[in-house]
Amino acid sequence: MNEPSESFEQKLARIDAIVKELANEQTTLDRGVALFQEGRALITACETLLKGAQEQVEASTRGEGKP
C-alpha cells in the first residue's frame, strides 16, 4: 500500500489503521509481521516527507533573512 502518490496524510492514516489492527488480539503472527513491515516502510516514507518539508521551510526562512 505504500504508493509514492499517497499523501503524507494518507500514509499517516494507514499507519493508524495498522496500529489498530496490531492491537487486535485476533491478528495472526504472519499478518502481524506483514503489518509491522508495512508500517515501518510507511514511517520511513513519512520521515522522508517531513525532512523535505523541513528543508523547504528552512530554505524559505533563510531566503527572508531569518535564521
Image: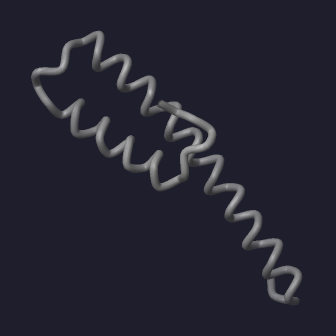
Residue 26 lies left or right of residue 32; in this view the side is left
Q: Residue at x 29, y 10 (%)?
A: 30
Q: Is residue 60 above or below residue 26?
A: below
> In front: 33, or 7?
7
Q: Residue at x 18, y 20 (%)?
A: 27
Q: Quadrant of residue 4?
A: top right
Q: Residue at x 44, y 27 (%)?
A: 38
Q: Is residue 57 above or below residue 34?
A: below
Q: Is residue 20 above or below residue 51?
A: above
Q: Quadrant of residue 5?
A: top right
Q: Residue at x 44, y 23 (%)?
A: 37
- Marks counted in the figure total 0
Q: Please provide percent x and percent y for residue 14.
A: 38, 42
Seen from this angle, which residue lies furthest front?
A: 5
Seen from this angle, which residue lies furthest bottom?
A: 65
Q: Is residue 19 above or below residue 52?
A: above
Q: Please provide percent x and percent y for residue 52.
A: 71, 56
> In front: 6, or 45?
6
Q: Please provide percent x and percent y for residue 21.
A: 22, 32
Q: Please provide percent x and percent y for residue 40.
A: 47, 32
State which quarter of the image contains the C terminus: bottom right
Seen from this angle, which residue lies furthest top?
A: 30
Residue 10 lies left or right of residue 26; in this view the side is right
